[in-house]
Amino acid sequence: METRLRLIITRGGLPEPVIGHTVYNRDGEFIGTPDLAYVDEKIAIEYQGQVHQTDPQTYADDVVRREQFEEAGWQVIPVYKHHVSDRPTWIVSRVSAALQKRAPRAQ
């Protein structure tokens, strides 16, 4: 599903996101590796499979992880199966808006 998500994003005309980027907090501690990332803009795109919704421990871990990403200055965009299958234009629109909002400004 992560591959399908990446293809939706790129076929929607957006830049290729990074796969496998590791994110650390301000103290250099590991936070996680989002499914897809726009590093300069600090956008993490996470596909939330069924286990993320049905397993209480996974869900709780996801909440903490999302908070850690946000504390490190990252925006997390969660994407679910119905977005991929039924709402691909929503995904492109959501990611595009985040990229525009968080684009590095020329100094």
Image (cartoon, rainbow, N blue to C red):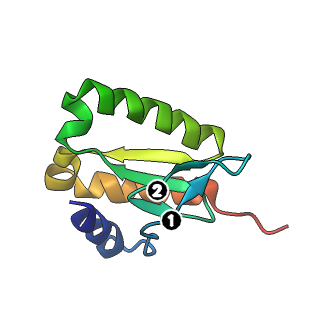
- Left or right: where 82 falls relative to 60: left
Q: Quadrant of the N terminus?
A: bottom left
Instruction: Name which residue lies at 42% across and 47% down.
Output: 77
Q: Point out the residue furthest to the left here.
A: 85
Q: Is residue 107 above or below residue 46?
A: below
Give, as a three-letter code, the residue at label 2: Thr
User: Where is residue 16 shown, x and y percent of the image?
Assistant: 43, 75
User: Where is residue 92 shown, x and y percent of the image?
Assistant: 35, 60
Q: Is residue 63 above or below residue 91?
A: above
- Left or right: where 57 falls relative to 4: right
Q: Point out the residue furthest to the front here.
A: 29
Q: Which mark is residue 84?
A: none
- Left or right: where 32 falls relative to 50: right
Q: Is residue 105 above or below residue 79?
A: below
Dot 2 or dot 1: first in sequence order is: 1
**Other-residue count near label 1 (Cα within 10 Å), few / some / many at <14 / 14–19 / ≥20:** some
Residue 34, image quadrant: bottom left
The front one of 60 and 85 is 60
Instruction: Name which residue lies at 41% across and 62% down.
Output: 36
Q: CA distance from mark 2 to mark 1?
A: 6 Å
The front one of 63 and 106 is 63
What residue is shown with label 1?
Answer: 21
The number of numbered discs placed on residues in the rendered structure image is: 2
User: Where is residue 82 shown, x and y percent of the image?
Assistant: 17, 45
